[in-house]
Image: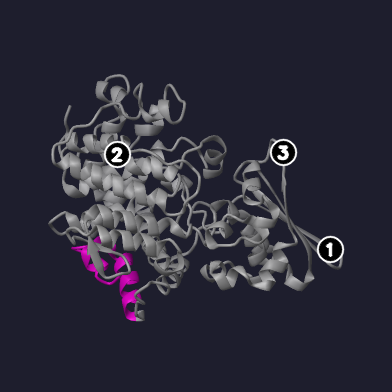
Amino acid sequence: MSHAVGQIPDYNPEHDREFKEDAARTLARYALHLKFEELPDAVVRLTKRCILDAMGTTLAATTLAPESPMFHAYVKEMGGVPECTLFGYGQKAPAQMAAFLNGSNSHMLDFDDVGSGHVSVSTVSVAWAMAEKAGKPVSGREFITAVAAGIDIHTRIYPYESTEEWDLRQPWSATQCFGYLSGAALASRLLGLSEEQAGNAMSLGYQQIAGASQRHLGMHAGWSSQGAVLAALLAQKGVPGAKDILNGKAGMFHVYLNQEKPDLQRLTGDYGKRFRTLELHGFKAWPACGATRRPIWAILSLRKDHGIQPNDVKSIRVIGGEHLLRLSEPRDLKRRPPHSAQAKFALPFTCGVAMAQGNVRLENYTPQGLSDPHALAMADLVTVEVDHNPNRTADSAAVEITTRDGKSYFREVAHPLGDDRENPMSQDQIEEKFRNCASFAIRPMTKGETDDVVEMMKNLENIPDVTKIIGKV
């Protein structure tokens, strides 16, 4: 069953035999045939922000992530055809290796977006590599459409409503596991693969899946980005792939998610019309684990609304779901994390920074920031409690600040700053975040270069060749 380019087949579970047998290949066709004109304006705006945001976090990691120099050294030692850009370095490497390094760096600071896992770092680095590998100019419209399709596929495969819910139920990294598939789909589009080849690419991505949820920041997105590029390039050469990789007997939902019958309506229903990314996505205003966002926002809001100063504080009590315990124990380690990767998953330390500084920024996770006496003093006042109330959702958290004069201030947060539906970051805030990230790039960007990137991203749908943007970084 084939369809003309640009024509998306209607969802028909009763008559579309191919849909019922192989959801992954339906999604592969969708990735190939989605048109820019079919994207809602809200999806276009969000996708452009995702691309800019991921570029920023990639650049910042080149100096702030301890592992980044090791990864860069490895890529340089491997050598190969210099075809795709290593962001920040002004150097090039084979497409697969560029996707590995850029993908790793984009996720390494845990400052990238959230939603159905970390969707942008699973897709954007693949898209940049394929734009340079394609052998012909890739327009901004085509680039946006490819990334939007990849993110939508990633979100459709993700079976839960929140990352917290996922983390409590699954031992796998959603970012990595689904990134092999979403990345392979968008890579297929940018390489101009056929429907059969695109389905094979997703299958070849599936055959590489790994991603235990033990944290090694960056690697989840690095492995899947590298693997997605490899899958698409092998499919382009004619390497075949299995079918039924999502809903088959040996498919992802049965093997990895313990589900005999995945929700096919969620997987492929209303594709091209309903973009669940708009319902689930969020940007990070602060460079720490996504589960810290609600406590941070509660502390900052109380601090601002009531004029609470650090010297006023007697105690800070954080109340939430069980997932917060993983960020608060062992207590001494979470109050005094020895390095940045641990600090980003240390709720007491991060809450201490928020109260002490009135914000949480990249600088707070440098060696100097980790030893800041004001933040450490506040971290010692933080306790974390699990609320077993069945009415509390995994997505909410509350903070109670008690001051030395005996007053108590309480704030519950379901939608922190960055929640795209209820409390979105403004375009100015997204751009300021990018500028802050770019200021840490290993090759410092001039103000003019940063301004150019911001303006080109805002006008991305009118850029005839997106590789012109890469030249700025």
**Relative vertical location of residue 202 with respect to residue 264 in this rendering, above or below:** below
- Other residues around mark 2 within 10 Å, as few (<14) / some (14–19) / many (≥20): many
Identity of the amino acid at label 3?
Answer: His
Q: In this rendering, would 169 be left or right of 314?
A: left
Q: Quadrant of residue 168?
A: top right
In this rendering, is residue 420 above or below 310? above
What residue lies at 44% left-to-right and 58% top-to-bottom?
A: 108
Q: Is residue 363 left or right of residue 129?
A: right
Disc 2 marks a residue whose amino acid type is Gly
Distance in Å between CA atoms under marks 3 and 1:
25 Å
Q: Using the rendered image of the protein, determine whether residue 263 is visible from the camera's viewpoint.
A: no
The residue under label 1 is which amino acid type?
Answer: Lys
Q: Residue at x 39, y 38 (%)?
A: 156
In the depicted view, which residue is nearer to us: 89 or 296?
A: 89
Residue range corresponding to the magenta coloring = 448-473
Q: Position of residue 445 (x, y in %)?
A: 35, 77
- Residue corresponding to mark 2: 205
